Amino acid sequence: MGWLQLLVALMVELIYDHSSYYWHFVPNLTIGAPVIESLRKHTNAYLDCHLMVTNPLDYVEPLGKAGASGFTFHVEVSKENWQELVERIRSKGMRPGVALKPGTPIEEVYPLVEGENPVEMVLVMTVEPGFGGQKFMPEMMDKYLSFCSHNPSPFLGSPRSVKHFPGFCSSNDASYDGLCAFRVLPVDGGLGPSTIDMAASAGANCIVAGSSVFGAPKPEQVISLLRKSVEEAQ
């Protein structure tokens, strides 16, 4: 996969990240499903949509029809209906993920990963959602350490390569063993050359980067550095 495709995947996440207003979840999206539909016409990249909205159920069908690959919702607004949400996401051909803000304890996502119909990705926010360019919160890495110690399976106890991101692997890939679920532990917020090693060493294996990539003179070099750090931490 070329770096331009990776930038597309990163851009989609950035678009939805900026659809919220700082600390408060809002019902409207700045850019919605039509953008996903347009992007899908030009790339096979994994398009993960990070929804920071009050009512994520309302967006499952339109994003599924538009061609989204993953649908990541926030645990803070889905404690009462996450099972229904996960089922609906899968029924539309997308992979479900859950995200949590800095102030939310990691323990709140445990039911979503231990249930009969679990999410496949746990995204830890390392900045308060709503604005790009914020400083990375290194103390958030303790959440990954707690998560992995609480789930000491062979997979969760040791980080895996970003190549295992659901959608990037296939049954024709020699490295694929059919166990994509829970292989993705992304981190979002303030990630760049000066902070990537802290995230990678804590177990994060999928890096969401916005300002550090799009603001760089040569984005492909930043992406290569981020990828190298994650792979070396395995």
Image (cartoon, helix red, strand yellow):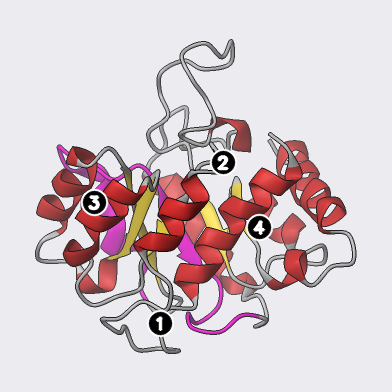
Q: Which mark is residue 150?
A: none
The quarter of the rendered structure image containing the N terminus is: top right
| Mark 2 vs 4, N-terminal side | 2
| Mark 1 vs 2, N-terminal side | 1
Q: Residue 28 or 172: which is nearer the viewer?
A: 28
Kind of residue at disc 4: Ala
Q: Which mark is residue 112?
A: 3
| Residue ID for mark 1 | 20
Kind of residue at disc 1: Ser
Mark 4 and mark 1: span between their CA atoms?
Answer: 24 Å
CB of mark 3 within 8 Å of CB of mark 1? no
| Mark 4 vs 3, N-terminal side | 3
| Residue ID for mark 4 | 199
Q: Which residue is rendered at x = 40% and y = 43% of the image?
A: 69
Q: In this rendering, which labeled residue sits more in front, label 4 or label 1? A: 1
Magenta residues? 104-132
88 above or below 216? above
| Residue ID for mark 2 | 43
CB of mark 2 within 8 Å of CB of mark 4? no
Mark 4 neighbour class, 10 Å CA radius: few under 14, some 14 to 19, many 20 or more: many
Mark 1 neighbour class, 10 Å CA radius: few under 14, some 14 to 19, many 20 or more: many
Kind of residue at disc 3: Leu
| Mark 3 vs 1, N-terminal side | 1
Mark 3 and mark 2: span between their CA atoms?
Answer: 31 Å
Q: Could you tell whether 84 is left or right of 190 in the image? A: left
Q: In this rendering, which labeled residue sits more in front, label 3 or label 2? A: 2
Q: Which residue is rendered at x = 81% and y = 46% of the image?
A: 224
